[in-house]
Image: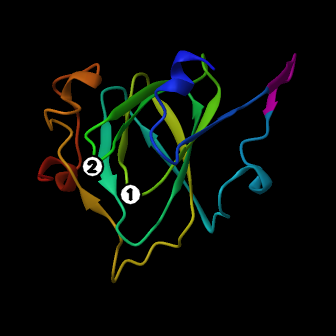
Amino acid sequence: MTDVERRLLQGMQLIPLRRFADERGWFCEIRRDSLLPRPVRQTNVSFSRQGVIRGLHFHERGQDDLFVCLQGMARVVLLDRESGETFSLDIGDENPVAVWVPGYHAHGFEALTDVLFCYHVSEEYDADNPDERGISWADPRVKHLWSTQAPILSPRDLTAS
């Protein structure tokens, strides 16, 4: 068991990704439902500039996420809201791994470079009744895990408590 695996929070899963490269570029399988604790129902992609933090978010009704950094490097940060335990891992070009995030953990990511980021989620988004709550990126339990102390934030993430 690696040091990273020893630090996993309850319900988390890391899925190594393999890139097959040649002179044309590369190919990578980023999701195989048979490896996941439950199926996903929606896939989202975001582009974030270096210095952006998205989160921390959590889901009370049970949405889980599969995080994959498609291009660039991102720091994934999780907080077990009950125990206060934390987890962080840099993923992307230099560490191709997918991270299964149980939605009851507060979670987010920081763009260490410009990143193209993919979220596979286990529930479809309901704009009329979203299952998304927030915790400040600067919460003392996680603030030390980010590489920046002056992130670029959305208005919603800026006001999370």
* Residue 16 seen in render: yes
Q: Residue at x 68, y 64 (%)?
A: 39
Does residue 17 appear left or right of residue 159 in this picture? right
Tell me the residue that label 2 is attached to.
81
112 up-or-down from 125: above or below: above
Residue depicted at 19% across the width and 29% down the height: 143
Query: Which numbered dot is residue 3?
Result: none
> Is 155 a magenta residue?
no
Nearer to the camera, 5 or 18 = 5
Marks 1/2: CA–CA distance: 8 Å
Q: Name the secondary structure under disc 2.
A: loop
Which range is magenta?
A: 19-27
Residue topped by disc 1: 104
Magenta stretch, main secondary structure, is: strand
Place of residue 13 in the rendered image (x, y in percent of width and height, measured from the top left): 59, 41
**As shown in the figure, which amino acid type bears the numbered disc 2?**
Arg
